[in-house]
Image (spheres, helix red, strand yellow):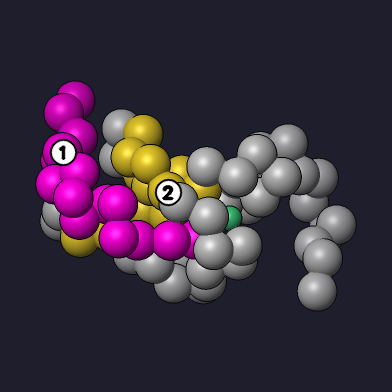
């Protein structure tokens, strides 16, 4: 399975919707580089989906414990 490799210069201008930190591509996702946040955004057809509805919470965050 191969993931689309985004242009690093493009990824560099993106930032996390939740905390504003930089994001990094990890396989088929963009992952917030802030360890306190850790939101993950899917990449669909080579286009990162930077939407709050699409963002996945980090696995370390228990479900039902969403902060406002
Ligand atoms: Zn973040």
* Position of residue 13 in the picture relative to residue 39 (left or right): left
Residue at the extreme top: 1
Position in image of residue 1 (x %, y %): 19, 25
Above or below residue 39? Residue 54 is below
Q: Which SS type dominates the magenta stretch?
A: loop
- Mark 2 beta carbon near ligand 1 (under 8 Å): yes
Asked if the residue under mark 2 is in contact with the one under mark 1, i.e. CB atoms within 8 Å, the reply is: no
Q: Quadrant of ligand 1?
A: bottom right
Residue that label 1 marks: 5
- Mark 1 beta carbon near ligand 1 (under 8 Å): no
Position in image of residue 10 (x %, y %): 20, 56
In the rendered structure, does residue 8 fall within the stretch colored magenta?
yes
Please name the residue shown 53% across and 55% down the image: 21
Q: Which mark is residue 23?
A: 2
The secondary element bearing badge 2 is classed as strand
* Position of residue 67 in the picture relative to residue 3 (left or right): right
Please name the residue shown 80% across and 74% down the image: 68
How many neighbours does mark 2 have within 10 angstroms: few (below 14), some (14-19), or many (20 or more)?
Answer: many
Question: Which region is colored magenta?
Answer: 1-16
Question: Which of the two residues, 68 or 65, is positioned nearer the viewer here?
Answer: 68
């Amino acid at each position: 399975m191969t993931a689309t490799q985004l242009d690093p210069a493009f990824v560099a201008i993106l930032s996390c919707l939740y905390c504003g930190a930089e994001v990094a591509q990890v396989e088929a996702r963009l992952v917030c580089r802030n360890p306190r946040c850790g939101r993950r955004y899917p990449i669909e057809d080579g286009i990162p989906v930077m939407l709050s509805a699409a963002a996945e919470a980090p696995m370390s965050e228990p479900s039902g414990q969403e902060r406002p």
